[in-house]
Each structure stands twice: as structure tokens, then as C-alpha cells.
Image (cartoon, rainbow, N blue to C red):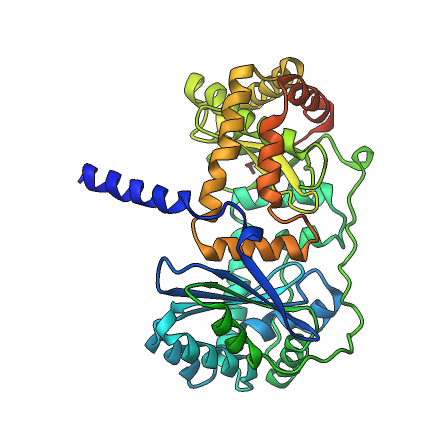
Amino acid sequence: MRRICWIAITALLAALSVWPTRAAEVALEWPIDAGTTGVLVEDHRAPLAHVRIEFGAGAWMPWFRDNDVEEAFTIQDHDSAGQLRLRADLLAARITLGVGRRTSLLTLDCHTEVLPQALELVGDILANRDFDRATLKRWQRSRTIGWKASLKDPSFVLRQAGARQLFGTNDPRRFAVEAPEPLNTDVDRLVRARERLVRLPGRVVGFAGAITRDEAKRLAADLLPVVDPLLPPGLGALPLVPISPERRPREVEVKLPRLTQTYLGHGRMSLATDDLDYPASMIADHVLGGHFNSRLMVALRQEGGETYGAAVRNEGSDVPGLYALATFTRTENGSAIEEKLRGVLREFCADGITEAERAAAASNALGRRAFARQSPAQLLASYLRDKRLNLPQGFDDQLAEKAAALSLDEVNAFIKRFHSPNGFMTVRVVRR
């Protein structure tokens, strides 16, 4: 069995070794119409197709929120008779509908033999006007139950308390930790919102897999409805409203009933990925709390037996997010683990890391990039993300290369600035 596993791994590595390292090297782009772009990442190693259709509005836009576009977009494959999902099952096709910060996304995965039929189904989904009211009502109940359950989850409450100290009330980064809006079940209103969304300019139809250029251009030509060039007001992103450090409390404590453990976060605002210091943060985070033998895990789990887990949680992306050193322990040990956590941070800031730690973190930053380009679908998603955010193509690979190229002195200078204990607040979730 072990020999078979190694043969499979060797074959995979051989295939990856001839696969281009960056999406920009293999992506073909062409205009479909005045408001739609086509993209293809061609790969004939397996008879599989992946389609990624992006529409130009998402959850961080006022128009999107005011018009209940999230439920309008995600319900459209649920017709009242269930025929759309049945057709997908019969084709062995997986169709997903989701909403991001700035875009709404439909993806399709199927065998290339059924790609034309699957795309016909996609067209029918995007034209569906028979949204299932029963599903909408079930989603509303689920949303309500899920929110109530999250308020009893100490890990969620810890994250919520941290976010509330970093981001203002109207900051979109608070959406994930605040009570969700009631779900709209007015089908006519939802259909109108969906119709407006799918006709917005800025659409992208991406193909990945065993599809030729001619096939992709032909299949994309009449897939989507005609673009409406008139934009509704409110398509700009909501402004970020960070709370200044001097207005944040040094300590926050939240109490929940019947807890047997204390949950602890030592946090601050993260860096955005385009920050000049972000490559250094990649090295620092790996050493501090990014793997089983990190500084936090050695001090709190392996040496002290204080906890099963301790890690760095970095929610930053193209905008800064929550950054925390997080852990948990039995209730009676809360004070002891907090002092050890503070001690790890003080030592990390004062002394930095060693050359051996830097080299290992650099190797990790470079080596893990291979996992992000194992499939043409991953390359397509990376290409479209960089395009959408106006980043240089291969941005994540460039970050890894910049991180690996940093000297020990450069990383330690960053650690001294960013990891100063004075810049962190402490959040605890404890037993009431």
C-alpha cells in the first residue's frame, strides 16, 4: 500500500513539474461583448471542465444589500418543482452559487462530455423566475437558529468581541459577526434584483480544463443575457471604518454561562496583503503560530500542557482584518496561560527569530505555493482574483518570493514594530 501511495505521489509531482507556475502563463483572455470578458485556462490532463462566472456586485455594496441581492442570487437554482437541481444531478454536474465582497459567483464542474448540456442548465438557472418560497422560508429559519447558536459558541464570541473593538458599527468587516438581516421571501422582488445583477457590466466567464479555445469562445458567446450599461446607484464599496488604537480598550471580557474553559485572544489590526510589510509578516506568523512546533505551540502545549491549540489568526486580505494570538484552556488555568501568552509575545518582540526559523518559514512560504496550482480551476481563480483587485498577475507567488528573500534583520525589524505588546488588546471569554 505504501509503495502504491508513493507511486501516486511521484506521478502527481511529475505532472505538476510540467505545469506552468503562474496563471498568467496559460490564461487566454478575449472580449465576449461590451460588458463581458472570457478567460480560458486550458488543461487536457483529465476530461473535466470548470466554469467560473463572476457578476460585478457583492455583499459590501449598498445597492446589493438594499435590494436583497444575496438571496436573489443564491435561490435561483431552487425552482418550486426541484427540476433544476434534478437536471444537475442527472448530468453529474456540480453548480454552486455564492456571494463575495465585491462579486457574485456561479461555478460549474462537470465532465467535458456534458458541458454543453450543463451550460444550457446554467442559462436556465440564470433565467429562472420560479424561486421556491419554501426553501427561502427554510433558509430564514436556519439563519435564525444559526445566529442563536453562534452566540453560545465561545470561539465566535471571542472573534465578535475583537471585531467590535477594531471596526466601527457600519464597517463591512463587522457583517460576519453581527446579526444577519431578515431574509426576503418576496419572489417578484428577488427576480427583479437577480435580473439587474446578471446584466451588470464587468462580468467574467472563465473556463478551465479540457476545453479548447474555439470551444470556449463558442460556448461563452450566448451564455449570458444582454448587458445593461446603466448602473444603479450604490455600486461602490461601503467605506471601511476602523476604530483608532487610542479609542480601543486594553482589555475586554465577555461572560458566557456554563463554560468549562477560558478562551483568550491577544489581538490588533492586521496588515493588508499589499502592505510593504506583508511578506515579513508571513515569515513572522509562521514562526510565532503557524505550525505545530511554532513558538506558541511549544510554550503553551508542548512545554506547559496548557492547551491543545494555540495559533496566530490572521483575517487580513486585500484590506486589514482581525489579527490575534488565540488559545484556550481550562477555566482555573486562565490567568496562567494569559501570562505565558504575554511572555511569548514579549520575547518575540524583543529578540525576534533565529536564522534557522527564518529559513524554515521561507521554505514553507515557497513550498506551499505548489498546493495552490494543482488544478486549472485554481489557476483560473487566482488569475481572476488578481484581475478583479488590479493586482499584478501571480501576486501570491510574488508575495512568497519576497518573503523568502527577506534577511533575518529585515524580519526582526518588522517584528519589533508590529509585535510590540503595547499595540495589542486582550479579549477573554470566561464563565459567568
Position in image of residue 396 (x %, y %): 59, 43
| Furthest residue in direction top, as rendered | 351
| Furthest residue in direction left, as rendered | 1
Position in image of residue 48 (x %, y %): 38, 64
Q: Taking the image as drawn, is residue 266 in sight?
A: no
- Position of 213 relative to 81 (above/below): above
Quadrant in which the N terminus appears: top left
Residue at x 79% of width, y 49% of height: 241
Q: Quadrant of residue 244?
A: top right
- Position of 372 relative to 45 (above/below): above
Quadrant in which the C terminus appears: top right
- Residue nearest the observer in this picture, 180 or 294: 294
Position in image of residue 91 (x %, y %): 35, 76
- Position of 241 relative to 342 (above/below): below
- Residue nearest the observer in this picture, 303 or 125: 125
- Residue nearest the observer in this picture, 389 or 211: 211
Q: Taking the image as drawn, is residue 358 in sight?
A: yes
Query: How many marks do you count on the picture?
Result: 0
- Position of 187 relative to 285 (above/below): below
Residue at x 55% of width, y 79% of height: 223
Residue at x 75% of width, y 34% of height: 249
Position in image of residue 345 (x %, y %): 62, 21
